[in-house]
Amino acid sequence: MLTGQIHLRLLSEPKNIVITTHHKPDGDALGSSLALYHWLKAKRHAVEVVLSSDFPTFLDWMPGREDVIIYPTAKDRATDLLQHADIIFCLDYSALSRTNILEPIIQHAAGQKWMIDHHLDPEDFASLRYWDPSAAATAQLIYSFICTVIGDKEGLTAEIATCLYAGIMTDTGSFRFRSTTSAVHQIIASLIDAGARNWEIHERVYNSSTESRLKFLGYCLLNCLEVIPAYNTAIFSVSKEDLQQFNVTTGDTEGLVNYALSVKGIRLAALFIDRTELIKLSLRSIGDIPCNEICKKYFNGGGHLNASGGSSNEELSQVVNKFKSILPAYKEILTT
Ligand code: 5GP
Ligand code: MN
């Protein structure tokens, strides 16, 4: 759904544009941001990508990643760019709080905010909104924004196609999730036609673990996994000490929760990580089990039906116990 399209005419003249996305960007967040960056640059806009944090090392190959501005290392410049932007793109988030430290700067910036996103319950901060919660990835929406809304399929360069492919691939679990429709496969086909080297992108994202990351995975499988058969639920709880022992960096825990979901019969999987500031929670489910409802109601978060996240200020063990105490309320849906 596109609202506020009247503002699109702003793009007919070169503008100052800043692209933002959520804290700790994943493949979809960074891929969408860099694809749009390349496209806007080719249209002669002055454009920068400003992130609230670094991004996982398995994304440290994406075309254009060396140009991104990471707020904590360039506060004045990032603030200045945001304050003077004509347009701030808000990609892959629908709540400003997901931009973490950038939230107040974006909130008070004078420029227009244009949201392109696929998360539920969008906040009302954007003058232009291209939003579809049924989209598999924000990268899918960037593709249709460029090709359909703007009508510039010829503008799809190999760089743009590569970033979009990576975004859709990571947000669909390599084209496995329910969101992977035939329309998604058709988009993927045209991204390959436009120059995305699909095999190379899989290789770069999925075969880039360090030895310690792989050993951390082995450690978690052996020591941090708890299966609760009565509720078809499996959880990982990872302590601060575990993270320190394996020198875990941004992105190293990505995908871990899926191992809990891969246990036969498991319908709900949770990952609790004791980060320095708070406990971060990731939930994944099968079928109609509403991860987003659980995260929103109990863990100050949200997301999609089958993939959501949240956080808590309590102790790790308290958060895990709280989660376990919620399971009886979902017993029927978890066990039928
Ligand atoms: P992950 O578990 O990979 O961190 O996040 C999965 C999905 O949950 C994300 O795509 C995002 O939609 C959502 N999500 C993760 N963390 C949060 C959070 O703290 N708040 C909200 N509202 N959504 C989150
Ligand atoms: Mn996404």
Image (cartoon, rainbow, N blue to C red):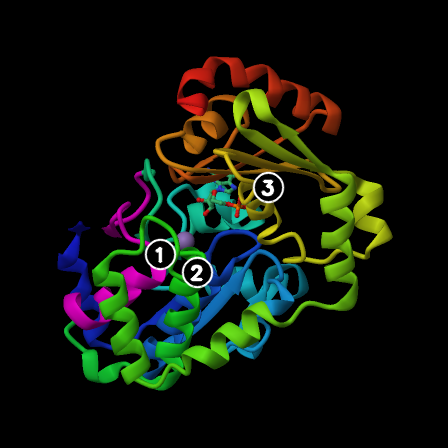
Q: Nearer the viewer, residue 84 or 191?
A: 191
Location of mark 2 (residue): 28
Regarding residue 159, the answer to whether it shows in the image is: yes
Q: Is-magenta flag for residue 136?
A: yes
The label nearer to you, 1 versus 3, is: 3
Q: Are marks 1 and 2 in contact (CB under 8 Å)?
A: yes
Left or right, residue 67 beside residue 237: left
- Amino acid type of the residue that numbered disc 2 sits on in the rendered structure: Asp
Among the 4 quarters of the image, the one containing residue 161: bottom left
Q: Is residue 225 above or below residue 328?
A: below
Mark 2 neighbour density, 10 Å: few (under 14) some (14–19) many (20 or more) = many
The location of residue 34, given as percent across then percent down, is 43, 72
Mark 2 Cβ inside 8 Å of ligand 2: yes
Q: Nearer the viewer, residue 122 or 311?
A: 311
* Residue range of the region highlighted in magenta in the rendering: 124-149
Residue 137 image label: 1
Regarding residue 43, the answer to whether it shows in the image is: no
The location of residue 280, given as percent across then percent down, is 63, 38
- Amino acid type of the residue that numbered disc 1 sits on in the rendered structure: Ala
| Total numbered labels placed on residues in the image | 3
**Could you give the CA–CA distance between mark 3 and mark 2, rounded to whole angstroms?**
22 Å
Which residue is found at the position 82% from the left and 55% from the top? 246
- Secondary structure, mark 1, is loop
Give the mark nearest the N terminus, 1 or 3. Answer: 1
Which residue is found at the position 76% from the left and 55% from the top? 248
Which residue is found at the position 55% from the left and 70% from the top? 205
The location of residue 170, given as percent across then percent down, is 46, 61
Quadrant location of the C terminus in the rendered image:
top left
Q: Is residue 22 above or below residue 81?
A: above
- Amino acid type of the residue that numbered disc 3 sits on in the rendered structure: Ala
Location of mark 3 (residue): 260
